[in-house]
Image (spheres, rainbow, N blue to C red):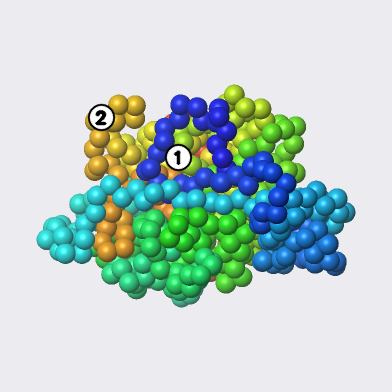
Amino acid sequence: MIIKKGFLAGALSLTLCASTVFASGAGVGHAQAVEKKYIVVFKDEAKLPTGYEDLLKKAGGQVQQRLEKLGAVEVSSSNPNFLKEVKNSSIVSEANVENKVYAEAPSVEATFSYEEAASVKPDLYEQNQWDIKQVTNNGESWTLPGGTGKSVSGEDIVVAVIDTGIDYTHPDLKANYAYGKSFVPGYSDPKDENGHGTHVAGSIAAKGRTLGVGPDLKVASYRVFGPTGEASTANIAEALMTAADDNVDVVNMSLGGYDWFQDPEYATKDVVADVQMFNRAINYAIKKGVTVVGSAGNNGVDISSPGKLSGDDKGATHRSPSNQNLIRVSAGGQLKNLAYYSNYGVGKIDVMAPGGDLGPNYNPETKEGRDNSYLCLATVPGGWGYKAGTSMAAPKVAALAGVIIAQHGKDQLNPAQVKHIILKSAEDVFKPGSDEKSGKGLINAVNALKY
């Protein structure tokens, strides 16, 4: 979305993660024949209603993409009155100009190429991956049944990475790469051209110079971001729905943004078509047995206060995608602190996981005191790189979900049970019980596998 003039006033402008923002489609323009794309969500949540094509055609719309199992479509139209005409129909729940999700610039702070890493001893895991050691208790979780992600039932446990793609040729990832699909128009290859998705995948299942939380888990690339760094919300919803149909076990969505609502009287679920569509897609996946994990965002703000997020503007601003059934993750540092950039909020964070920061002496205002060793090292195309952000925290929770499933056997636990184990086994790091920074606490794979 376009950030309103008062939105997040004074907040840090971060490039420490490819956390994303929604681009607004609600700009006011002249009533001229400019073609736009719209999301239309129908009242039936499970199928497209009879007569929907005639309705859209009569309003000057042409269907571009059908999300039949979500009761939604992506439509193009040059009719300036398209929304008004469509919303008058009794079969329509909501419609709006389609939002775009933009990936931020890659946040690699330093890289090792394959050649450079050849001379680095000891291995990169031993020397640099404090975050993986923190989650696994220095690899202790790998000695427990299912702890590496190798299922007791013998079936592969697959974590879908909805992101910029995965570099499936990377030596630390190629053995654990399951398959890939692209949802980027004009790009059929699910290979990463950005670096973010490969870093996320490495945090989950790298097995080589670096290691993931579950080094025997499988990762699947569901590429939604192209070289321009943007994705339509319809394509993200389609990727999530497809992953569920493909019977993956876990989905990681290190993406998100904010939806602004002019009228605070309306609830999120009743206002914007994109929000409804995302909720339906998440619920669809969860009903199919998929555990869904999402990042909390990197603006260092309280996301439990929609009014305050809007600053001087009227209305309410909400973190999106938002769904009470997914696992939302804040980012912690090496010292088990809340990272300075991480969003937080009472009732909005489920758990915290290591996402990295710039050390205890770093001053975000002056940019002084930086220590790159507190960042998270993982795979990137062509080598290894450092990043930090809630986008780096979420995949550790997705991997933990994967190893919990591996310990019990594929399809033996439902997503609510997986979430319950993750939350109940978390380490209290701030206030006893739940708190606004870490939710139930810092994830701990050893505790989870002994639960």
The residue carrying pointer 1 sits among few (fewer than 14), some (14 to 19) or many (20 or more) residues within 10 Å by Cα, namely many
Q: Is residue 220 visible?
A: no
Residue 109 spot, x, y in % from top left: 28, 47
Residue 411 spot, x, y in % from top left: 57, 68
Residue at figure coordinates x 28%, y 69% from the top left: 171
Residue 177 spot, x, y in % from top left: 40, 71
The residue carrying pointer 2 sits among few (fewer than 14), some (14 to 19) or many (20 or more) residues within 10 Å by Cα, namely few
Residue at figure coordinates x 64%, y 53% from the top left: 98
The reply, left or right, for residue 166 in relation to residue 367 is right
Residue 228 spot, x, y in % from top left: 45, 57
The reply, left or right, for residue 369 in relation to residue 156 is left
Instruction: Determine the secondary structure under disc 1.
Output: loop
Distance in Å between CA atoms under marks 1 and 2: 19 Å
Most extreme residue toward the top is 312
Please tell me which residue lies in front, 434 or 256.
Answer: 256
Residue at figure coordinates x 56%, y 46% from the top left: 23
Judge whether 382 appears above or below 264 on screen: below
The amino acid type found where label 1 is placed reads Asn
Residue at mark 2: 368
Residue at mark 1: 298
Q: Mark 1 or mark 2: which comes first in sequence? A: 1
The amino acid type found where label 2 is placed reads Glu
Whether the residues at callouts 1 and 2 have beta carbons within 8 Å, the answer is no
Please tell me which residue lies in front, 59 or 171.
Answer: 59
Residue at figure coordinates x 46%, y 67% from the top left: 221
Most extreme residue toward the right is 90
Q: Is residue 396 visible?
A: yes
